[in-house]
Amino acid sequence: MFSVLRPFLFNLDPETAHDLAIKSLKLNPFPGKMFEVEDEQMLNINLLGKNFPNPIGLAAGFDKSAEAYNSLLKLGFGFVEVGTVTPLKQLGNPKPRIFRLEDDRALINRLGFNNDGIDVIKSRIKSGGKHGILGINIGPNKETEDQKNDFCLGFKNFFDVADYITVNISSPNTEGLRDFHDQEKLKDLLLSLNKIKKENKTKIPLLLKISPDIKDNHIPEITDTAIRNDVSAIILTNTTNGNRSNLISETKKEEGGLSGEPLQKISTNMIKKFYKQLNGKIPIIGVGGVDSGKSAYEKIIAGASLLQLYTGFVYRGPSAAKDIKKELIQILKSEGIKNIKDVIGKEI
């Protein structure tokens, strides 16, 4: 069906098409059985105190305000991450702010954390419940005077409704956010969040989402700070400000974060570097250009335990997770591997 609808959808403005997709998913149109695959037990993995049916997750940014996460889980994703959620409702940057680069199988976005805010989103999740593993990605409002306090507000509000919380310090579209990659600033933030964990006697996993644009010499600092401050997993990576020179599409000069196929090798190389540095102490979730079983497998053997996609979902449509699972299972069978966990970091 998607192959028939895709030309129509891709003739629409990207944000209009996205809003239409969210509205359609809210109607819960697909039976979950459509997206089950044979031998999916080969993809089961235990991580963060949870049993993930498969490692293919949907990244934050698609369901920003937690409107359709249960329908998205039915599409075969092993987990879904919603957000980024800010304390107050936020409209985001002026439109247009999403651009398709079809020749590059990529997107550029400068959305700016548009979402309904903590109160509405928390209420929505509580009333909708969870039919799978749900992560919540938190960040600060654009006009806030205290970004760290905004992170703390997000954490306080969601630790009792999420399966994990991701601290997003890596979007290129919020001024000053990437400053939290600085070792002392990151340490201060994590200490504050862990204090909230301790006060509320919660063991909710705390994840950290990293920019692909950091310099190599920052990797040991970030990994050391993460290990010392009980980060449960590191998400590699968010969108990039760079890597535009080899793109074909005319819209390549638009400001914003680049995602999709051009990010594939950048994020995989970052996974390899972090995997060596972390030495098994913290698992990695790989993001960036995951659009096939092959690209998924490359990130797993580079050191990722779980994966997320966004742009690949836009281009492949509702069957993206199902198709990638099938392709991944075929690769495992051809290699004589019984479970996906047996190849994590195999290349390193």
Image: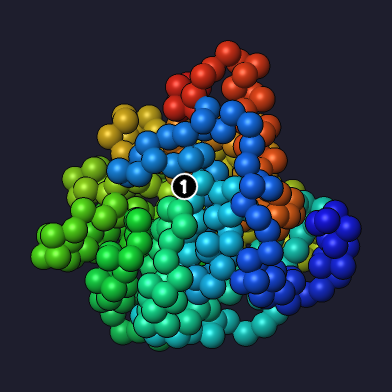
On the image, the x and y values in percent for residue 118 come to: 38, 79
On the image, the x and y values in percent for residue 57 come to: 53, 49
Residue on which disc 1 sits: 236
Quadrant location of residue 145?
bottom left
Q: What residue is rendered at 66% in x and 75% in y?
A: 23
User: Helix, strand or loop at disc 1?
Assistant: strand
On the image, the x and y values in percent for residue 195 come to: 14, 63
Left or right: 65, with 72 as reference point: left
Quadrant location of residue 49?
top left
Q: Quadrant of the C terminus?
A: top left
Left or right: 231, with 247 as reference point: left
Left or right: 102, with 234 as reference point: right
Q: Amino acid at mark 1?
A: Leu
Q: Is residue 139 above or below residue 285?
A: below
Q: Around disc 1, counting alpha carbons within 10 Å, would you say few (fewer than 14), some (14 to 19), or many (20 or more)?
A: many
Left or right: 230, with 123 as reference point: left
